[in-house]
Image: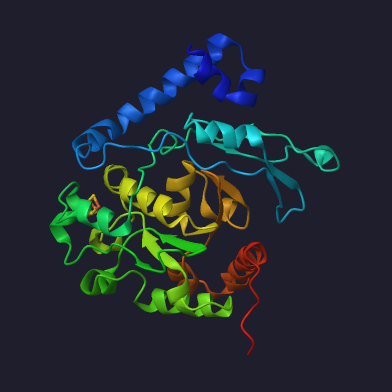
């Protein structure tokens, strides 16, 4: 293996021998091929041939999970991310016996879909929208009225990511404008912000029929645009709404009830999964859990709740 790549894998290499490590890298590469990511970027290469040679360095940070267990984001992981080595890690403390000592790092259940995608130097939201064009890259284009790109502050510290447009969004071209959208707006205001302060986007930009969840092939084709939006906006915190967006960005099959309320690292950005506002409309009893999740986000961003 190339010595530079070997070095970039950092701490991971300390716990695997060369053979295991090489096999894992091959698995990651095969994974990207299976998802068809190569053609997507080859097609658009003439527009944006220059990719950043390195991502911004990510500081080591320690966050407290809701369970009170220290969760570390070590420099080794940041270095791996900066080299775009496929080194997605969700750091968890393994057992109660380790709570009082240093936390340990466990690999994510699967490599991140996006770890191998290059960041695009000089990318902008208008350019991303231009690249989407009148998109027909997946079957969702057949039933859409409008592409729902995303909306809000292009320099937002906080970015919400939902799954896909519903009927109201499909008609208006704006995300989260129906009943669930009104609830999200209320949640944002309760955090001491205005809707215009944050950025809101979805995993897929066109409405799935009958409001079903986006399917894997649709997510594969559309989510690179979301990735570029995240890379362009560079929020301090991403708050995913519902299972689809959390599972897509974290590349996990874990359910939202297991994921919500815990901090994750997504390419150097803190990510907090919580329930989708549409779920809260059906299950208002879950609102206190979401409010606890949002309060963790507020603590990181230094926000004060809106005074009543
Ligand atoms: S969902 Fe995304 S990939 Fe599919 S047609 Fe719409 S914009 Fe294109």
* Above or below 84: residue 30: above
Residue farthest to the bottom, as pictured: 308
Which residue appears at 41% of the width and 39% of the height? 114
Provide residue 143's location: percent of width, then percent of height: 16, 60
Question: How has the structure been colored for display?
Answer: rainbow
Q: Is residue 257 left or right of residue 304?
A: left
Indicate the position of residue 219 as horizontal and vertical percent values.
32, 47
**Horizontal side of residue 224 vs 60, given as left or right:** left
The quadrant holding residue 153 is: bottom left
Out of 59 and 241, give the one closest to the viewer: 59
**Residue 237, image x, y percentages:** 55, 58
Of the 4 image quadrants, the one containing the C terminus is bottom right
Q: Is 290 placed above or below 185 here?
A: above
Which residue is at 36% across, 59% downward? 202
Q: For the view shown, which residue lies furthest in the right direction?
A: 100
Please say whether residue 107 is visible from this viewpoint.
no
Q: Can residue 38 be seen in this view?
A: yes
Please tell me in which quadrant of the rendered image residue 287 appears.
bottom right
Question: Within the image, what quadrant is residue 220 found in?
Answer: top left
Residue 208 vs residue 9: left or right?
left
Left or right position of 70 against 154 = right
Using the image as rendered, state which of residue 104 and residue 122 is in the foreground. Answer: 122
Residue drawn at 42 percent across, 18 percent down:
26
Q: How many labels does the image show?
A: 0
Residue 282 image offset from top left, x and y in percent: 46, 72
């Amino acid at each position: 293996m190339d010595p530079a790549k070997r070095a970039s894998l950092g701490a991971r290499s300390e716990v695997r021998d060369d053979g295991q490590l090489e096999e894992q890298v091959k698995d990651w590469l095969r994974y990207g091929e299976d998802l068809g990511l190569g053609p997507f970027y080859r097609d658009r290469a003439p527009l944006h041939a220059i990719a950043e040679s390195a991502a911004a360095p990510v500081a080591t940070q320690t966050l407290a999970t809701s369970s009170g267990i220290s969760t570390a984001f070590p420099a080794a992981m940041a270095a791996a991310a900066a080299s775009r080595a496929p080194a997605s890690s969700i750091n968890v403390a393994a057992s109660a016996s380790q709570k009082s000592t240093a936390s340990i790092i466990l690999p994510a259940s699967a490599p991140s879909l996006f770890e191998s995608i290059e960041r695009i130097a000089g990318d902008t939201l208008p350019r991303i929208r231009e690249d989407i064009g009148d998109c027909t890259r997946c079957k969702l284009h057949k039933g859409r009225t409008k592409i729902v790109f995303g909306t809000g502050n292009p320099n937002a510290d906080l970015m919400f990511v939902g799954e896909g447009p519903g009927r109201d969004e499909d008609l208006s071209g704006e995300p989260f404008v129906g009943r669930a959208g009104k609830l999200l707006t209320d949640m944002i205001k309760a955090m001491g912000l205005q809707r215009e302060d944050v950025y809101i986007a979805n995993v897929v930009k066109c409405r799935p029929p009958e409001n079903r969840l986006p399917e894997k092939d649709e997510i594969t084709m559309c989510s690179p645009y979301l990735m570029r939006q995240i890379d362009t906006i560079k929020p301090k915190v991403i708050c995913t709404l519902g299972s689809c967006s959390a599972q897509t960005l974290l590349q996990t099959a874990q359910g939202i009830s297991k994921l919500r309320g815990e901090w994750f690292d997504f390419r150097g950005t803190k990510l907090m999964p919580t329930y989708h506002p549409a779920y809260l409309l059906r299950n208002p009893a879950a609102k206190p859990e979401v409010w606890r999740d949002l309060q963790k986000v507020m603590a990181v961003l230094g926000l004060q709740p809106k005074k009543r």
